[in-house]
Image: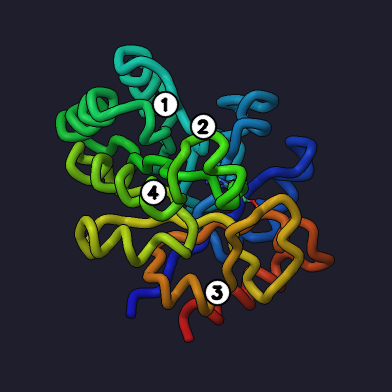
Amino acid sequence: MKAPKLCVALDLPTKESNLTLAQSLKIHSKNLWLKVGLRSFVRDGKEFLKELRNIGDFKLFLDLKLYDIPNTMLDTLDEIHKLGIDMLTIHASSGVKAMKALAQYKQETPNAPLIFAVTALTSFDEETFTQIYNAPILNHARNMAVLAYTSGCDGVVCSCFESKAIKEATHESFLTLTPGIRPFGEESSDQKRVADLAFAKEAKSDFIVVGRPIYKAQDPKGVVTKILESLQS
Ligand code: C5P
């Protein structure tokens, strides 16, 4: 079985603290993806991405979850590509036309980022999800994933609870990226659909995202080492 790749969420409150975290993980840089989310990107922008690249061979994942009209998303993807990003998130609910336009851009553009479409945020439980979408999470996530797959996206963002069903409904090679990971059963905080590493492997997740269990730990590098070892075992 292929081990999931680890994405570390850089969600700390200052640029300096995120850079210190990245520095401390430099030894693992070839095996790590760094996830820059809305908070960091809004505050620290392009310069921050450059500084991360200067630290090591990390892959960079820009988690902006784009949701807009197709033309705006396409223009934004073009700008993001110029930043040398390796992976980008969008919302699948922005529609087939938008996803197809981005997939087409990728086909025509060497080294364009991987595109992952968000199906259902992991902070939803069934009750809060139904309030908004009037559908069970699994059905909705699977439908969104089929649309993302047929539109040409590289994969989807989902929880470990939907990952296997999504692969069954699309293709084994269609990638799943799963946040809401509590590697060794840590506190779930605002996440609702959480899973540990064993579950993530069993769910055939291709990428796992871990934030607080790493950056809030006394020894983030130690936690990352332990996660990487556990993913390989
Ligand atoms: O701290 P924690 O491990 O819960 O962080 C999860 C990260 O993954 C956060 O940066 C959050 O924005 C992101 N994310 C998520 N659920 C999604 C997509 C992204 O939690 N569906």
Q: Amino acid at mark 1?
A: Ile
Residue furthest right as drawn:
218
Which of pointers 3 and 1 indicates the residue nearer the eye? 3
* Secondary structure type for disc 2: strand
Q: Which of the pair 161/184 is nearer the observer?
A: 161
User: 118 above or below 5?
Assistant: above
The part of the image, by quadrant, that contains residue 69 is: top left
Residue that badge 4 annotates: 141
Where residue 197 is drawn, which disc sits there? Answer: 3
Q: Amino acid at mark 2?
A: Leu
- Taking 7 as reference, is 5 left or right? left
Residue that badge 1 annotates: 80
Say whether disc 3 or disc 1 marks the residue closer to the N-terminus. Answer: 1
Say whether disc 2 or disc 3 marks the residue closer to the N-terminus. Answer: 2
Say whether disc 3 or disc 4 marks the residue closer to the N-terminus. Answer: 4
Which of pointers 3 and 4 indicates the residue nearer the eye? 4
